[in-house]
Image (cartoon, rainbow, N blue to C red):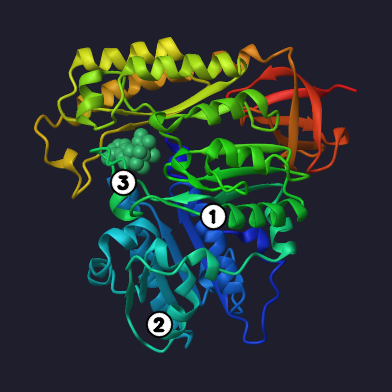
Amino acid sequence: MEQNYSLESVGDTATRDAVEARPDGKKVFVKTYGCQMNVYDSQRMSDALAADGYAPTERIEDADLILLNTCHIREKAAEKVYSELGRIRQLKQERGALGRETVVGVAGCVAQAEGQEILRRAPAVDLVIGPQTYHRLPMVVKRARGGEKIVETDYAIEDKFEHLPAPQRKVVRARGVTAFLTVQEGCDKFCTFCVVPYTRGSEVSRSVAQIVAEAEQLAEAGVRELTLLGQNVNAWHGEGADGREWGLGELLFRLAEIPGLDRLRYTTSHPRDMDDALIAAHRDLPSLMPYLHLPVQSGSDRILKAMNRKHTGDDYRRLIDRIRTARPDIAMSGDFIVGFPGETDADFEDTMRLIRDVTYAQAFSFKYSPRPGTPGADMDGHLPEDVKNERLQALQALLLEQQRGFAASLVGRKLDVLLEKPGRQPGQRVGRSPWLQPVIVDEKAGEIGDIIRVRITDAGSNSLFSEPVF
Ligand code: 5AD
Ligand code: SF4
């Protein structure tokens, strides 16, 4: 169940044909690790580089510029980057022997957290750039091509989004009918296990005007489903068009007015920032999808306190009740950590009980991984790997049972599916249910970008099967 959070995508190859190569024919290969925000950032970096003449390539060996957009959330994620850099060193040497220069860059949260250390550990790297300075990337790449080694990890005073070029319309189209839009970055919550407040900095919200303009551009280019992103997305706030202070709920009401944006989502949220306006948005906005990723991490009040979550298990249960009263068909998703320092069998049982009480349609679960510089890493009572493994297995078995139960409950029901891409088999398309499950649809039922009504005929382990309803 970890896969969505250790997602590795080779960035943005869909835009390859949409970006016109310049005569000097430079190519960039971007590999993305980690969360959806990194996927969005990789796209914005590709857009900035495209404006500078770099066309995306899927083939790393053809790339004049290799960028790894990295994740630091758990130790495994960070280590993967270093092993990839080992392979890239070899490739750089081979290209060098053929007289072809390769610039290697590390972006994202490992870049921010480790800075200079990356140049020491991985000599193939030419540039290290943190998430707050992506607008400087084209300039940094030019300097690296001139032979400089560069570490650019300060928190820029200027607004990077003001300086990043908007993607071209045809690039947006090539990326498909769903899109991400970062509205908020950083986190002030300081959960004791988490590196995010250190790698992404304190909470910053983008302005309503910037968000609305970007959402309108995306909709105009054919995007039907928009997912608002933020490390703590429901902490977003800003001055609204009416001069009042808005929260995410009010922002969603505004975005729902944009023609063409038929589906809205947001991720990731903190239980303490679910305010009344946001719950009202779930009640009143048909385009806000009935699916909510709301991590709780643990069901034990003692561990929640040690994690500095500032809520109890019952606070969370009551909150879910309020959300379900507002939107009865909402399906829940969450994140769980097992084996936090000091977690006893009884604490773990509390987590299992909370999962049974809430019932999740989907969830992500992780073994606690001590992150240098976070308070959790220095706590007493670290647990042995085998205890963590055992608990993770039990927890994942329960979550999988719930996920299958939810999928099975949809068989026989009619629902709306957004058609996203061709299927693996001829004659099929793949769409998304309101609850993010892939749905296999007959291609005659509609075109990519259509929202069509289907009846679910069967639930497989990863997707739903359907027949059109006319
Ligand atoms: N160890 C394990 N899991 C972690 N997460 C964040 N930090 C850690 C860590 N140190 C998980 C949390 C978070 C998700 C993005 O990753 O569950 O919600
Ligand atoms: Fe990390 Fe907690 Fe902030 Fe989420 S709310 S990004 S888990 S510190």
Q: Residue drawn at (64%, 48%), measured in percent from left and top? A: 179
Q: Amino acid at mark 1?
A: Ser
Q: Earlier in the sequence, mark 3 or mark 1?
A: 3
Q: Residue drawn at (64%, 56%), measured in percent from left and top? A: 214
Q: CA distance from mark 3 to mark 1?
A: 35 Å
In screen coordinates, is 308 left or right of 204? left
Q: Amino acid at mark 3?
A: Lys
Please give the label number shown on residue 76. Answer: 3
| Nearer to the camera, 424 or 110 | 110
The location of residue 53, given as percent across then percent down, is 61, 79
Q: Earlier in the sequence, mark 3 or mark 2?
A: 3
Quarter occupied by residue 432: top right
| Nearer to the camera, 186 or 3 | 186
Whether residue 359 can be seen here: no
Q: Residue drawn at (48%, 14%), measured in percent from left and top? A: 321
| Nearer to the camera, 339 or 180 | 180
Disc 3, disc 2: CB below 8 Å? no
Q: Amino acid at mark 2?
A: Ala
Q: Which residue is mark 1?
A: 207
In screen coordinates, is 260 left or right of 189? right
Dot 3, how many residues are within 10 Å of its Cα: few (below 14), some (14-19), or many (20+)? few
Quarter occupied by residue 394: top left
The location of residue 190, given as percent across then percent down, is 27, 42
Dot 1, how many residues are within 10 Å of its Cα: few (below 14), some (14-19), or many (20+)? some
Quadrant where the C terminus sits is top right
Q: Quadrant of ligand 2?
A: top left
Disc 2, disc 1: CB below 8 Å? no
Q: CA distance from mark 2 to mark 1?
A: 33 Å
Whether residue 439 can be seen here: yes
Discs 3/1, front:
1
In screen coordinates, is 374 left or right of 222? left
Please give the label number shown on residue 144. Answer: 2
